[in-house]
Image (spheres, grey):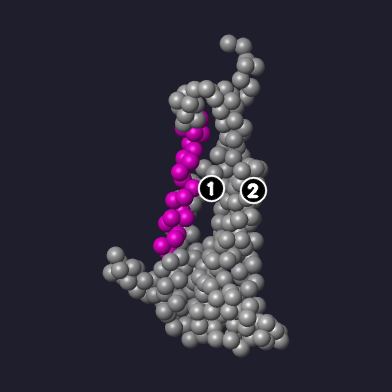
Amino acid sequence: MSAIWKAAGDFLILIINGLYSLTHSYGLAIIILTLLVRVLLYPLSHKQMVSMQKMQKLQPRLKVLQEKYKDDKETLNKEIMRLYKENNVNPAAGCLPLLVQLPILILLFRVLMNLDLGGATFLGISLEGSVLSTMASAVGASADKIGIGALFSAIAANPAGLLNVQMYLGNLVLLLVIAFLTWYQQQLSGASNPQMQFMNWFMPAFLTFICLSLPGGVLLYWGVSSLVGVAQQWYAKHKTEVEMQEKPVLYKDKPGSRKE
């Protein structure tokens, strides 16, 4: 397995260096790499987003089925699967694009942790440094594998160092943009579902915590990918609304309200 990871990492380095030789910017190289990945994953991601939107639209009809067959679980499951099939919905489709992207994120993280970018920056973003390490450098602390607790201690010892905003502002702003885009995507996918309200806030907070220690290059990949994802989600939402309007509204009436 380690040989596969090494080969994949070497291939990713080859792509990044090739794109750098064309653009003379590691930031642009990462952005182009991101767009290439999104194009390759578009069929999967589009299917996932359409499926999620359809699942939202089907919630009222699912509730009617659950009420109608609450004492017959076997029939309920059959009716739910029939409803999914009629509307081309795959409940398991939501995880696949994320599972495909995770190895790329891990590879990119490993590559950028070991690839010498010569201190490269892009629009004020340190591609090698994380939010934690750039803030640590700003207050004069060691940036090597610094944690949140150590950073707070360093800031308490030298709060004036935070005035060196040019050292960490780009990474911090990018982190906040990623947090917002994650929250916004959660709103698009599950805002109307009360059961999703906790996840709407938990996921952005959790990902923000994870991203604190990620190199700026990984954050740049993640941010651009999230921005493209929002655009795709808007398109999928519009397409789903059109398709669902053309579908017959099954189980429109409440159980017991129809005459047999």
Residue in the foreground of this view, choosing between 95 and 57: 95
Q: Which residue shows up at 59% across the image and 35% down it? A: 59
- Image point (58%, 66%), residue name: 209
The residue stretch that appears in magenta: 82-104
Q: Horizontally, is 211 left or right of 115 in the view?
A: right
Q: In this rendering, which labeled residue sits more in front, label 1 or label 2?
A: 2
Amino acid at circle 1: Met
Where is residue 49? Give x, y as percent. Answer: 53, 47
Q: Quadrant of residue 60?
A: top right
Q: Which residue is mark 2?
A: 197
Q: Is residue 89 left or right of residue 137?
A: left
Residue most extreme to the top: 260
Viewer-proximal residue among 140 and 245: 140
Nearer-N-terminus badge (1/2): 1
**How many marks can you see?**
2
Residue 54 image-quadrant placement: top right
Q: Is residue 9 left or right of residue 89?
A: left
Q: Residue at x 52, y 22 (%)?
A: 71
Q: Position of residue 239 (x, y in %)?
A: 58, 43
User: Residue 129 at what x, y percent from top left?
Assistant: 54, 79
Asked if the residue under mark 2 is in contact with the one under mark 1, i.e. CB atoms within 8 Å, the reply is: no
- The residue carrying pointer 2 sits among few (fewer than 14), some (14 to 19) or many (20 or more) residues within 10 Å by Cα, namely some
Residue 84 vertical placement versus 97 (above, below): above
Disc 2 on helix, strand or loop?
A: helix
Q: Which mark is residue 49?
A: 1
Camera-nearest residue between 131 and 142:
142
Does residue 250 appear in this view? no
